[in-house]
Amino acid sequence: MTLRSNTRRASSPTRRRRIGRALVPLLLPMALIAAACGQKDGVAGTAEDGGSGASPSAPAGSQAPAATAPGGTGGTGGTGGTGSTTPGETTVPGQTTPPGESTVAPTQPPAAAVYEPGDNDADGVTDDKIVIGIHAPVTGASPIPQESFDIGKDIYWQFVNENAPDRLFGREVEVVFRDDEFDPQRAVQVCREMVEEEGAFLLVGGGGADQVTACAQYASENGIPYLSAGVNEEGLSDLETYFATSLTYSQQAPLIVAQLKEEGFDQAALVVSDTPSFEDFNESVKTAAEEGGLELIFETRINKNADPTESATVAQQLKNSGAEAVILLASPVVYVLGLAPGAANQSYDPRWIGPGVTSGLNIVTSIGCPNVGNGEFFSPTPGLDLITDLDPDFQWAYKQFGGGEPADDIGLQLWSINKAISIMLEQTGQELGRAAFMNTLVNTASFDNGIYAPLAFTPDDHFGGTGAHLLEADCEQKLYVTAADFVPAE
Amino acid sequence: MNEALRARLGWIVGAVLAVGLAVVLIVTGEENALVIGVTQGSAYGMVALGLVLVYKSSGVFNFAQGEFGTVALFVLYLLDFETNYWLAMAGALAVAAVMGFLTERIVIRPLFEAPRVILLVATAGVALLAIGVQIWFGDAQGKPIDKAFDRVDRITVLGVQVTDQQLALIVVLVALAALLALFFTKSNLGLAIIGASQEPTATELVGISVKRLSSFIWVIAAVLGGLAAVIAVPNLGSFGPGIMTSQFLIPAFTAAVLGGMTSLPGAFVGGVLIGIVQSVATSAPVFQDIPGTKSTLVVFIVLLVVLLVRPQGLLGKPAR
């Protein structure tokens, strides 16, 4: 069943470009005003006062295919200003301006600083360098390809360094990476190392909800900004320095239910990993199902490291329940090595659907096909089939800096979050510190990197995602392709 | 009590327990767990067979048993691109045999006189080294692996499809357990191995090379580990570094202890029992409120109860 709504189709790139062209006469004057106010590319409605006024350079003799510098053109002058948007106002998902061009929503009034600089406020920042630490599981029970991380972790920054070296006020970004081995305790250890030994200014979680939660808690205790794709809310919602750059699992629950209803399912089963941090997703799905008219006919929690017998038993229970769709939040290992083959061995082929990110990675289809051929997962980024439409710089940069390796979806995840961070750093200005950076995040109406749905943080809400892409498995190509782009959060 | 009856007590208890368990599961609507337990538990049983073999002959808990299998899987994966599946499988088992031989010659033999705990740690070292090498050469990612038999719906038992691959596993396991039991009780070589494990000096004195026997046992154990992996894991569709250690070794150890560390048929029975208990613990409503790894918890409770009642395990012989 692959019914898609017209509204989803309406947000296809072609239509977005049409909308963009139609809005040019309206946007142009606004762009000029915003540029005069120092509006940065990809930023809507800043309130941070006292920006440095340094302007990002256009690529000098750039060979990049994009018409603009990475992240696009910028204005001059300070970032404070006046405007008409209200705090938290976002760019409409799916109707953003084309990639590389400025989002030019008017700014909001200056807001009071939420964060005060601490003793180590500028650690990891010098006149010519910013250090960013990334951790992810590349060994352990649920590994993500290490080579992809090694190559992809700083391709965006190489691209910026080459094409717009002044964009971050003369600073280059150095990325340090550590393997957290899919172990929360190890994650804290490597995060501490990256901060204390490598001098990371901010930390990024590359995957694994429990590791993200553990490291984010460490970061919060030490006043260090921490960004990751949205995972659980439990354990993260009250952390002052944590920021989710896409919808949390709970926020994706209504999208999952809506998607299943759209595909014609009235019943589904729910399988969630038994880690306590997924309790919020479990409850959110139940609530969304009730509100959305989807009957949950079977529910169970599965061990985070379920063995083959447990997985086979759960697969049999799913089959016995008669569920034709299964909402799943578990590690890719449990999905690929356990549930999907367990179901296939019983000639049971349900629609697997769940929140992003890791089950929607191409590593899942490359080793799990054909058993995962009916899988569909939300993701902060689209599939590789759509990225060139959204951000042509990505493929170009991989050709230039990828050492001959083809671009992959791990690289796209890294490119996207680095691009978002770049916009945030630029918006913060030359006087960069941890407090200033986080004040920028919570006082800016939205950040739009052209790949994610725009990000909108407030002082009280650090879960910044406003939409997601939907990926579906294509076992002929053994990868995920984009089924719907910029699906807005409900 | 009659000596013959005493010797068979384990079998009688095991049979009664098995029948009782089957009846309870069918009556309570958990009959699926019975079939899943047998099919999944057979894999544990086959790994346990190798563990028992090494323990029986040398008193060593072999933590490298799982990795003999994972290495075989990597070889099967690589050769499957180059040649037909059966040749690839033969190559995989040959490499497992070589690994077993090398482990014995390089690690076990130099430590032959050392306390058993040193050997235990040494085998754990072999396992970790093997996993490291797998990651080094094959990266940490999963790899798809083909089945020898693709059909999944030929047989349905109590509502559960038993795939041809699972059927092959059960048949091979039963055959191997029986053959090895006969080997150790009826053949001169088997009796020599038992003799070497109990009285190595006396065995040397009658002209039998204990070291050569040790090599032989490790090669057979490694082939058993390889066989378990190349038959059981394709049911999962893919594998990664250390899969036999992370997914199969602990249940297999438990199965071996439950069956009686010296009993080869006990390894089979223990494996199946562990599979059934895990499956029941996952599906039965009575266990649903247990948080965390309930299947592991229930398995260890069962193990504890069995060992309290019968310390030598279900089919093991009491220490004299």
Image: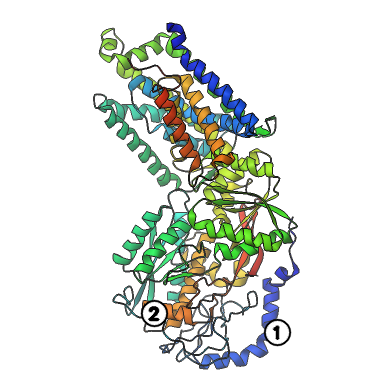
Residue A64, image x, y percentages: 53, 75
Q: Which residue is mark 2?
A: A115
B134 shown above or below A267: above
In the rendered image, the quadrant that contains the N terminus of chain B is top left
Which residue is nearer to you in this view: A252 or B163?
A: A252
Q: Is residue A38 left or right of residue B158?
A: left
Mark identifier at residue A22: 1
Disc 1 is attached to a residue of which chain? A
Q: Which quadrant of the structure image shows residue A428?
A: bottom left
Q: Is residue B29 left or right of residue B191?
A: right
Query: Which amino acid type is shown beneath numbered disc 1?
Result: Ala
Residue A373, image x, y percentages: 65, 50
Disc 2 is attached to a residue of which chain? A
State the residue at coordinates (29%, 11%): B203
Residue B172, image x, y percentages: 55, 23
Q: Pointer 2: residues within 10 angstroms few (<14), some, or many (20+)?
A: some
